[in-house]
Image (tube, grey):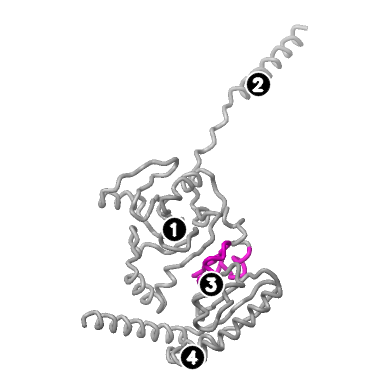
Amino acid sequence: MRVRESWVVMALLCLGAGCAGRQSKVEAPPPPPKPPAEAWSWVPASSTTIGRIGLTELRKTKLWPLWSQLQGEQKLASWVALDKIERVTFGGTGQSQNEVSYVAALEGEFAIEELAMLAERDHVAVETRGLLHVYQRPEGYWTQIDDKLIVVCTADRIDELTARASAGEGVPVRGSALYQSLAERVEIGSAQVTLLAEDPEGKARARIDQQLSRFGMSGLARDAQRVGVSLEIGADYRIIGVAETADDERAQVLQDEVKKSLDSISSNLFVRMLGISTLINQLRVSSDTHYVFLRGNVSEIDFNTVIERVDSALSLAAGAGSLSGVQ
């Protein structure tokens, strides 16, 4: 009996030790939340304009000098050196400079303290908002996520940006009607330049339609509820344009109007002089349900020739403007 009792006691002791071990085990606390490192995660789901520009690819093309010239004329500037930025992903609302509201995610190779160093140089104070260290500048707020991503927003978006930082991973904008309607149709994943836009109130479409009416192209903007364009840069330049209309009938009407307008533009003498008619003739218009598509592949040689001529025409116009100003 004593032997049996000893085994029972030992079993109880072992069981007790096991239970104590299990009870004393403390689960590690979850890691603290981190701001998302995906550029698309920062684009507001409410955006009526969404875009992405691959600056690295653009720098290798004839478009870059033209862009640099236009940038200088518009006095556009970035707090972060432009040559460090490889890609810009953005989204927002507003149809004029006074009402523009946006968030832009800048991808590139940055110093881990890129903004901190710029802030010290320019005497800009740092402010802590939730998980973010932000710097207020005239154009808005800047914050650095890591050495690959910097985010900038207009002042009205700072509270939204702060909340997004602690909301975890995910891309809310991909659930928006604008993105779901057009992103795949313009092949956003492979394009170096993409722009999606919608105009729920119709004000921008009315203005554009009024301007186009001067050239006999009224109705183009009126029928397009959402529009997307993309440019894929490779051995050839692949251009895709998509317009979403209210129904199949409106799509057919818009398709006919686009064809007619392209023919009219292509026959213009000035357009022919610039070589733009060569590009237009390689574009094809089609429709599928309530969408209208404009697609074309343009050779690098043809594309560069047009860009060079447009650049020369802009330079001549700028020179003429300077001379008239002197007189």
Query: How far is the residue under mark 3 from the one under mark 1?
Result: 25 Å
Mark 2, secondary structure of its residue = helix
Q: Secondary structure at mark 3?
A: strand
Q: Earlier in the sequence, mark 4 or mark 1?
A: 1
User: Magenta segment range?
Assistant: 181-208
Image depth: mark 2 or mark 4 in front: 4
- Farthest residue toward the top? 2
Q: Which mark is residue 19?
A: 2
- Which of the marked residues, 3 or 1, is nearer the chain's N terminus? 1
Is residue 263 shown above or below 76?
A: below
Picture coordinates of residue 92 (x, y %)? 49, 58
Residue 230: assigned label: 3
User: Which corner quadrant of the image does residue 108 belong to?
Assistant: bottom left
Would residue 117 be counted in the magenta stretch?
no
What residue do we see at 50% from left, 44% from top?
Answer: 163
For marks 2 and 1, the one nearer the N-term is 2
Q: Amino acid at mark 1?
A: Glu
Question: Separation of disc 3 and disc 4 at Cα?
Answer: 25 Å
Label 3 – label 2 distance at C-alpha:
63 Å
Q: Which residue is mark 1?
A: 99
The amino acid type, in three-letter code, at marker 3 is Ser
Which residue position is annotated with label 4? 268
Q: CA distance from mark 4 to mark 1?
A: 36 Å
The mark lying in front, picked from 2 and 1, is 1
- Under tag 1, what secondary structure? loop
Residue 229: image location, x then y, percent: 54, 72
Q: Position of residue 282 (x, y in %)?
A: 56, 86
Marks 3,1: beta carbons within 8 A = no
Query: The disc labelled 4 sits on which kind of residue?
Result: Asn
